[in-house]
Image (cartoon, helix red, strand yellow):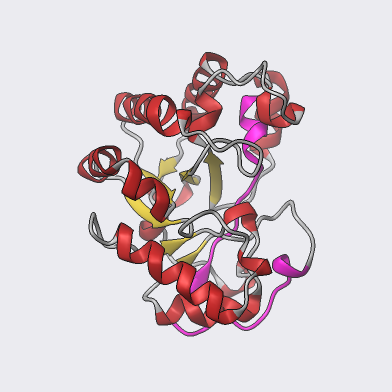
Amino acid sequence: MNAADRPVVCFTVDAEQDCPPYLGTFRGMEQGLPRLIDLLADLAVPATIFATGDVARRFPAVISRLVAAGHELGCHGDTHRDFSMLTAAEAAAELRASLDALRRFAEVSSFRAPYLRFTPEHLPLLAAAGIRTDSSQAVYKRGPCQRPGPVPAGLRRIPVSVTSSVLRLPGWIRQPWMASLREPVVLFVHPWEFVDLRRERLRIDCRFRTGEPALAAVRGVILWWRGRGASFQRLCDVAPLPKALSR
C-alpha cells in the first residue's frame, strides 16, 4: 500500500478529572493514563493528549512522561469549564491559565474544548494564543458550536470522528462503524474510561465496559486500524485538510 493510500488516524486523549461534571476524583490520571501510555508504547502509537491545566499542575510526573514518550501535549482548558458558557474575557483567562501550566512541559499548538463545545466567536482567541489546530468540533454533533464559519488565518479545525464510548463496543458492532469514518479519523478516549466505573451512578455510556475491558477494546481498535494499513499521526503532524473537507 502506498503511503498516500494509507488511512490517517489520530489517537487522542482528553486528560481531565473523572467523568466531569459528575465526579471530582482523579483515578483516571492516577491509574488509567499511565496504563494507556504503556499500551501506546507497546503498539508504537503516537498520540495527542489534551490536558487541562489543572491535571498538569496536579500530575506533573505523568505529563512529563507522556511528553518524553513523544506524544503531543495539547490544551483542554484549565479547569474543564464549558467555553460556550464563557464571555470572551473569561475564555481568554481560562485559555491563558491552561497554556501557562502546559507550556512548562512542551510546546502546545493544539486545542480541544471540554465537552466539545467552543463557540466560533472565540476562535480568534486560539489564533492569538499560538494555537494552530482546533479539534473542538465533532462530526456526530449538531448545534451552534458545530456550525461552520470563518476560521482565523493560521488555524485549522480537525473534528472528532466518533464519540469515545463507541470504541468500547464489541468489535462486531464497532468495526463497521470505524470503516464508515472519513479521514482523517480522529478517535478520542478519557483516562477515567480505563478505571472500573461500572458501579458508579453514571450514565450507561460513561460506565459500561470501563476498566480492563476498555483497555482491551482500545488495543483491538488500534490493531484493527493497523491491519487496514493506517498511519497513526499526532494532530500537529497531520497535513492540512483539502478545502472541500474543511469545516
Where does the N terminus fall, quadrant-wise?
A: top left
Q: Nearer the viewer, residue 2 or 210?
A: 210
Counting from the top left corner in percent of width and height, residue 105 is at 23, 54
Q: Name the residue at the left extreme.
A: 68
6 part of magenta stretch: no
| Residue 6 versus residue 238 in the image, above or below | above
| Figure quadrant of residue 21 | top right
Of 54 and 124, the residue lying toward us = 54
Q: Residue at x 66, y 33 (%)?
A: 165
Q: Is residue 16 visible?
A: yes
Specify whether 217 is left or right of 176: left
> Farthest residue toward the front?
24
Query: Where 195 sits versus 88, above or below?
Result: above
Residue that appears at 61% across and 66% down: 83
Q: Is residue 88 above or below residue 12?
A: below
Q: Position of residue 230 (x, y in %)?
A: 46, 39
In the rendered image, residue 207, in percent from the top left (x then y), is placed at 67, 24
Q: Main secondary structure of the magenta part?
A: loop
On the image, the x and y values in percent for residue 77 come to: 48, 60
Residue 102 shown left or right of residue 182 in the figure:
left
Is 152 included in the stretch rendered in magenta? yes
Residue at 31%, 65% in the rendered image: 100
Quarter location, residue 179: top right
Magenta segment range?
Answer: 144-168
**Count of picture labels:** 0
Front in this rendered view, residue 86 or 105: 86
Image side of residue 201 versus residue 28, left or right: right
User: Would residue 109 be visible to someone looking at this image?
Assistant: no
Quadrant where the C terminus sits is bottom right
